[in-house]
Amino acid sequence: MKSKIILTALLSVSLFACAQETPKVKHKKSTSSSKSNVAKVKFANAEDPICHMKTEDDMKDTVVYKNKTYGFCSTYCKDEFKKNPEKYVQK
């Protein structure tokens, strides 16, 4: 009886862990007063390959992969791309 309870608890925890979604990224709206002196760059991607947010010329989270610069809306998206860039690079 005790082993059934423990087994049920373990299964419930594992199912709950598998059912969780990828964490949502909170995007900041940029305003003209909050823009820094970041150089405008033409990115190889028109949208963030992780969350599909449109790239902007002044994004500070960037990665150079195969001599192309990719822009990201957040550090989280940049780090996800760096784990497996081939998965996200358009051929």
Image: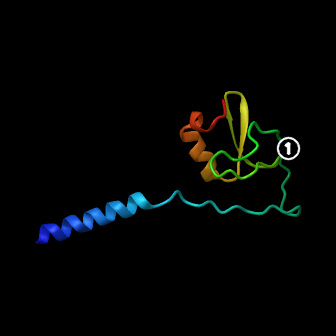
**Mark 1 crowdedness (10 Å alpha carbons): few <14, some 14-19, many ≥20:** few
- What percent of the width, then of the height, locates residue 72? 69, 48
Place of residue 90 in the rendered image (x, y in percent of width and height, measured from the top left) = 66, 34
At x 75%, y 36%, the residue is 44
> Can you name the residue that lies furthest to the right here?
32
Q: Quadrant of the N terminus?
A: bottom left
Q: How is the image coloured?
A: rainbow
Examine the rendered structure and indicate whether residue 29 appears above or below residue 70. below
Residue 87 placement: quadrant = top right
Residue 27, by quadrant, is bottom right
Q: Amino acid at mark 1?
A: Lys
Secondary structure state at the residue bearing disc 1: loop
Residue 3, how many percent across, how many down? 13, 67
- In the picture, measured across the screen, residue 8 lies left or right of residue 57, that is left
The C terminus lies in quadrant: top right
Query: 65 left or right of 2?
Result: right
Residue 11 higher or lower than 52, as above or below: below
Residue at 83%, 46% in the rendered image: 57
> Is 35 on the left-hand or right-hand side of 85?
right
Residue at the spot of label 1: 40
Instruction: Using the rendered view, name the quadrant where residue 84 is placed.
Output: top right
Identified at 58% across, 40% down, the residue is: 82
